[in-house]
Image (spheres, grey):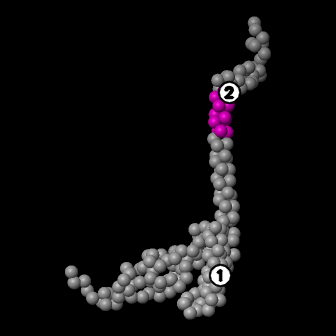
Amino acid sequence: MSEQTTAGPDAAPLQDAAPPEPTAEDRIGALEAELADMKERWMRAEAENANVRNRARKDVDDTRQYAVQKFAADVVEAAENLKRGIDSLPPSSDDQPPILAKVREGLEGVERSFVGTLERNGIKQTDPVGQPFDPNLHQAMAEQDSDLHAPGTVIQAWSNAWTLNGRLLRPAMVVVAKAPAAELAAPDQS
């Protein structure tokens, strides 16, 4: 008789003692699934890192471009005051004293140089006269009846619009054309 039969009723069967070992194909399949999961996690992490780097780069670029915004607004005020000073001089005439002509020429040269320096550093002025009114660039100070201009057109500028790298520093103070009152009151007779 075999030893298994003599072991007795308390002996456990041998097949329940240890779980079956996975086959090589099962182990390879599990490792490949784990590898695919890790690759996907890595790709997501890399994409997130790239987004963080791009956002940080954009924030640094914006900070670099617009950090001087308050200073630029103050400098624009100085440029406007220089222009007002030149405009306050009496008009040129043949009988004016030579010193007045030299002062005007000197101040106009300083203004050209100053505005050129501002433009090279991203601060630009825009003359709004003749353009359609744009509330993003213009501040309407008054409306005026006009037969010569289409309604909504800027007909006079008290000051120019100033921008820093495309961002508004100061809006232009403008007078906007409107249809004459007679045209508004008369019904269309077509």
Residue 175 appears in the figure: yes
Across and down, in percent, residue 166 comes to 58, 68
Instruction: Kindly identify the residue that appears in the image at 57 percent across and 74 percent down.
Output: 125
- Numbered tag placed on residue 27 in the rendering: 2
Pick the front one: 118 or 3 = 118
Residue beneath disc 1: 106
Would you say 142 lies left or right of 164 here?
A: left
Instruction: Kindly identify the residue that appears in the image at 62 percent across and 70 percent down.
Output: 119
Instruction: Kindly identify the residue that appears in the image at 75 percent across and 8 percent down.
Output: 2
Residue 179 appears in the figure: no
State the SS at label 1: helix
State the SS at label 2: helix
What is the magenta range? Answer: 27-39
Magenta residues, dominant SS class: helix
- For label 1, the crowd category at 10 Å Cα-Cα, with few meaning under 14, some 14 to 19 and many 20 or more, is few
**Above-or-below relation of 37 to 74:** above
Identify which amino acid the numbered label 2 is placed on: Arg
Give the distance between the C-alpha atoms of the residues marked 1 and 2, in whole angstroms. 88 Å
* Circle nearer the viewer, 1 or 2: 1
Identify which amino acid the numbered label 1 is placed on: Gly
Across and down, in percent, residue 76 comes to 64, 78
Mark 1 vs 2: CB contact within 8 A: no
**Above-or-below relation of 116 to 53:** below
Indicate yes or no whether the magenta region holds residue 103: no
Across and down, in percent, residue 78 comes to 66, 81
